[in-house]
Every structure is written in structure tokens, then in C-alpha cells.
Amino acid sequence: EDGTEDQVASFIEWYAAQRAKHRLLICGNHEVNLTQKAGNDRDRLSALLSAGGAVTYLQDSLVEAAGLRIYGTPWMPRPTTEVYAHGAWCIDGEGPELAGRYRAIPEGLDLLITHTPPQGVLDNNGLGSAALMAELRRAQPYVHCFGHVHSGYGHKCATVCASSPGRPEKAVLFVNAAIDATSPEAPVYFDL
């Protein structure tokens, strides 16, 4: 829950042992202790989290795995509640800095992984990011997986209106896979 060094090491050990050809990972707002140790330095974090190559750490980065184009980014708008206001990977407001991070999301993705949901989709009535939703209209991935808003757990297919005239709308599968120690929810499985 609070990303202590021992918790992160325990999770990485467990995750690396899972039977899967590819294991992808992004950080979120609870990884405060981890970012205090490594900052936002992608190479240092990757070294800490890769389990000798068994796990692929995504931080504003694209990977091709099993023939799929996958991009991951941890950034999110800073929550306004005091409990989470000092979390990791948070940017104040929905302004140019956050929009710039999301603008780096490439088009033609099979899977987008973010920590936060887009505004209006499985986000408990508006807790998601408007800047992220704006870039989803441009990037239009086939699947967008995220977490952060635990009460929004679930999945739905929704049409994303294109950001440019003349560009077709596209159905996107949205998956909020947020779970915690007290959640009864099962993992979400899907095929691409």
C-alpha cells in the first residue's frame, strides 16, 4: 500500500515468478518510498524493478511484446484529498505539464497502461484525468488498462470520439484493474 522497500522487493519477487511470457509494470502514486530512492530516473527504477529482466518497467516508454505495441506511463493529476496529495508521479492540475506527458502517448497502440483512469470512464464520477481523455481521443488504443480509483473496478467497451474531423470513432476496451488487500475483485483477463 505505501511502497516500502521491502513491500516493493516482495512484490517484484512474486511478480517475476508468475507464469507469463511478458510481465509489464508501471508505478503509481503509492510508490513514494521508491521514487525517494531513485527519483523519476527511468534507468534507475528499471534496474530496481526489472528482476534481472523478468519484468519490463514502463515509464513513458513503448515496448513490443507478443507482437503487440504497448505503452505505459505513471503520471496523474495530483489528488485534491490531503491523504494522497503528496503521492508519487503526481503533477499539479490538468495543465500543460500533464498534457505534455500524455501527448507522448503514441498512436497505433494495442495496449495503453496508465496509473490513472481517463475522466468519465470507470473513475467514480469524474476522478479521472481530462488531459488523458483528450489524448485518448487522438491515440485511440485498442485497450486501455489503468487502476488508481478502486471504486471504479471493472471493464467496459466505449466509443472514443476522434480528436480530428474526418477521423473515425473507435471502440476502446477500458479496464480498471484496481484492487487492494481488502478488495474481493478478481484479476481481469482479456485476449488481444
Image (cartoon, rainbow, N blue to C red):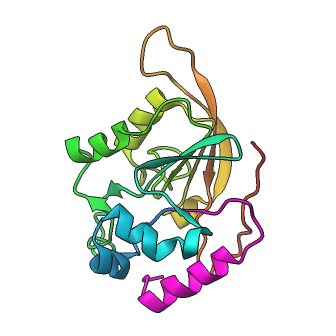
100 shown above or below 86: above
Residue nearest the observer in this picture, 161 or 30: 30
As drawn, is 156 to the left or to the right of 25? right
Q: Quadrant of residue 54?
A: bottom right
Q: Is residue 55 visible?
A: yes
Q: Residue at 44% of width from left, 45% of height from top?
A: 119
Q: Residue at 63% of width from left, 51% of height from top?
A: 175
97 shown above or below 171: below
In the rendered image, the residue lying farthest to the top is 166
Q: Residue at 71% of width from left, 78% of height from top?
A: 17
Q: Is residue 181 visible?
A: no
Q: Quadrant of residue 56?
A: bottom right
Q: Position of residue 144 (x, y in %)?
A: 58, 45
Q: Position of residue 40 (x, y in %)?
A: 30, 65
Q: Position of residue 55 (x, y in %)?
A: 59, 67
146 shown above or below 164: below
Q: Position of residue 162 (x, y in %)?
A: 49, 21
The region drawn magenta spans 1-25
Residue nearest the observer in this picture, 11 or 98: 11
Q: Quadrant of the C terminus?
A: top right
Q: Residue at 64% of width from left, 63% of height from top?
A: 23
Magenta region includes residue 16: yes
As drawn, is 108 to the left or to the right of 127? right
Magenta region includes residue 123: no
Residue nearest the observer in this picture, 68 or 103: 68
